[in-house]
Image: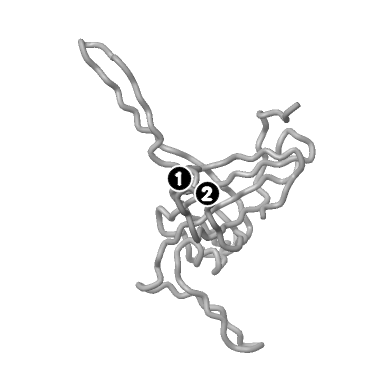
């Protein structure tokens, strides 16, 4: 008997971004190594639907709807230079030796590429109705839709956030997946 398809969703425990390196027609999408989104706090998924109505003879004859956009908004507690590179472009350079090491992220006119990426988030174990289970949201092909919210906050922690728009993969048409696991599974 299959597991229930209905569940609560409680919290988010982990999220990872994977650069999309290849999306060939008819053949599997290929992703780079997963990068942790540090201190994930929220992952909100929304969409837009365009509705067209056909009228004639002074009455409504038909209605047709189409999904025109899927978007995700992510907030996380810690800044990651590797995440910035994966979602915005740029380059990270490590230099120096202890005690004067540096890690510098530079965004230039040549490397601000807005590369496509995958985002996967997961509830903690028992964050769903299935004891010991979890749920993974996977957005297969995203591109930033606004510049990330970065900077400082006066006398407070600065929360980092970004929004991205989804496109269907060329390889298989997938935009978004919800995977409900009977046994909790880490993000690969």
Do the residues bearing badges 1 and 2 touch, measured as CB atoms within 8 Å? yes
- For the C terminus, the quadrant is bottom right
Q: Quadrant of the N terminus?
A: top right
Residue at 47%, 52% in the rendered image = 142
Q: Which residue is mark 2?
A: 140
Is residue 70 shown above or below 129?
A: below
Question: How far apart are labels 1 and 2 at the CA level?
Answer: 7 Å
The residue closer to the viewer here, 136 or 39, is 136
Q: Quadrant of residue 49?
A: top left
Structure colour scheme: one colour
Q: Earlier in the sequence, mark 1 or mark 2?
A: 2
Residue 58 x, y percent position in the rendering: 21, 11
Where is residue 130 shown, x and y percent of the image?
Answer: 75, 34
Residue under the image location 61 percent in, 51 percent down? 41
Q: Is residue 144 left or right of residue 10?
A: left
Q: Is residue 34 visible?
A: yes
Does 31 sit above or below residue 131?
A: below
The residue positioned 58% from the left and 48% from the top of the image is 42
Find numbered disc 1 in the image and state the secondary structure of the residue it sits on.
loop
Q: Estimate the x, y position of residue 20 in percent, counting from the top left.
A: 51, 58
Dot 1, how many residues are within 10 Å of its Cα: few (below 14), some (14-19), or many (20+)? some
Specify few, some or many for label 2: CA neighbours under 10 Å numbering under 14, 14-19, or 20 or more: many
State left or right for residue 83 relative to residue 184.
Answer: left
State the residue position of label 1.
168
Q: Nearer the viewer, residue 141 or 40?
A: 141
Residue 152 visible at all: no
Instruction: Please identify the residue farthest to the left as the structure is shown.
Output: 57
Which label belongs to residue 183?
none
The furthest residue to the front: 26
Q: Is residue 90 above or below residue 118?
A: below
The local secondary structure at tag 2 comes to strand
Asked where in the image residue 131 lies, by quadrant, the reply is: top right
């Amino acid at each position: 008997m299959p597991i229930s398809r209905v569940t609560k969703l409680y919290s988010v425990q982990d999220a990872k971004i994977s650069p999309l390196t290849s999306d060939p027609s008819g053949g599997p999408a290929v992703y780079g190594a997963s990068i942790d989104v540090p201190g994930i706090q929220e992952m909100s998924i929304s969409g837009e639907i365009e509705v067209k109505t056909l009228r004639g003879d002074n009455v409504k004859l038909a209605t047709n709807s189409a999904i025109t956009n899927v978007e995700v908004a992510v907030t996380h507690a810690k800044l990651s230079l590797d995440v910035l590179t994966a979602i915005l472009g740029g380059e990270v350079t490590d230099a120096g030796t202890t005690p004067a090491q540096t890690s510098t992220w530079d965004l230039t006119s040549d490397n601000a590429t807005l590369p496509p990426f995958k985002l996967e988030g997961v509830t903690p174990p028992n964050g769903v109705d299935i004891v010991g289970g979890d749920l993974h949201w996977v957005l297969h092909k995203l591109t930033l839709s606004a510049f990330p919210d970065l900077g400082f906050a006066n006398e407070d922690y600065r929360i980092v956030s970004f929004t991205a728009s989804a496109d269907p993969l060329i390889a298989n048409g997938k935009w978004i997946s919800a995977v409900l696991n009977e046994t909790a599974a880490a993000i690969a």
